[in-house]
Amino acid sequence: MASAKGGPLSGIRIVEFAGIGPGPFCGMMLADHGAEVIRIDRASGDRGGSMPITNADVLARGRKSIAVDLKTAEGVALARKLCASADGIIEGFRPGVMERLGLGPDELLSDNPKLVYGRMTGWGQTGPYAPYAGHDINYIALAGALAHYGRSGGKPTPPINMVGDFGGGGMMLAFGMVSALLNVARGGEGQVIDCAMTDGTAVLMGMVHGMKNMGVWSEDLGANMLDTGAHFYDTYETADGKFVSIGSIEPQFYAELRRVAGLTEDRDFDAQHDSGQWGALKEKLTALFKGKTRAEWDALMEHTDICYAPVLTMSEAIAHPHNVARGTFFDGAGGKQPAPAPRYSKTATDTPAAAPMPGDHSDEILETLGIDAAERAALREAGTVA
């Protein structure tokens, strides 16, 4: 049984097979909201990525860690025993790896028919690309998203790895895990979740597909209202080399932009939705915003209905009064980090604990499985557990 934690997922135990990117993000989401997430790390301590392993790893926060050698029969047996005690598991290996380890769905669901088996991949468990390597940039490219991020005359620009790894991947798997766990709680059976970043990214593009189907979205780069084509939905550089964002789509917000910026009498701006005029109007706004510093524009446009915000770096965002007032960030291991989201009116979440180092909780976890001190010592001596 999972140990008690604050949050709506308190009492749920998740086993996470160590990986990188979207799998850990899913584990972080579940842990942030109260699940006991036990991470099976490699006995070597390596997680297979290029990032250093430290307590400051935000994606690994709130876990317990046991380090197991899954290349041994004893290590696999131990992992099966741990998964039999869990409500769900998360794994992010290429298709077939868990099966070759003897930890595939057939084995784990036979041990625990109520288990929710979450599988996180880029291409999915099936399809021509399934066996091959890839990264976020490739997944969002194939899903038809990357072609639409960028400016007219430029080339597609990946939005870091927010869309494939985290939006279409880890967040989608967290949603799938909670949905399947709810189904089990209502009397359903355990099952496998095939979460592909290509599928998830395609879902995130749902509104844009709808707009295209309705004839109001062009596939040309940077030619639409929401992709920097429009003058009223873009970023602008200020006199001090910083940037502001404008999203004045609705007529009342556009009118407020014109009023505050002193453009009410400029009749050229009457043609808000004439895309043929967007380029010329953008040139005017570019010159306008260059005339004041970002702080001066903040003083004029913050706390209005213009749909305005300064473009902040991570460090600036941490210190902004709105984020401070909401507690959007907290002091964690290694520095400030995002607080759990969303918030609940009646169920408080705990402040996430620092990321564990591989094997920090090995003894504690083994003890919950009924493995006594002598057996634990033997497992460590054999190198099955580190």
Image (cartoon, rainbow, N blue to C red):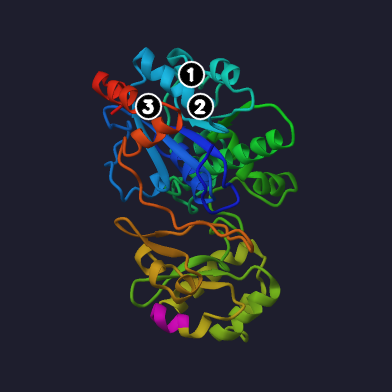
223 or 323: nearer the viewer: 323
Residue 274 located left or right of residue 127: right
Q: CA distance from mark 1 to mark 3?
A: 24 Å
Question: Pointers 2 and 1 in contact (CB under 8 A)?
Answer: yes
Q: Which mark is residue 343?
A: none
**Type of the residue with mark 2:** Cys
Query: Residue 67: x percent and y percent?
Result: 33, 30
The mark that comes first in sequence, 2 or 1, is: 2
Q: CA distance from mark 2 to mark 1?
A: 9 Å
Asked which secondary structure carries label 3, the reply is: loop
- State the residue at coordinates (52%, 18%): 104
Q: Which residues are magenta?
A: 292-298
Q: Which mark is residue 83?
A: 2
Q: Which mark is residue 103?
A: 1
Question: Pointers 3 and 2 in contact (CB under 8 A)?
Answer: no
**Type of the residue with mark 3:** Asp
Query: Residue 145: x percent and y percent?
Result: 55, 42
Which residue is under mark 3?
372
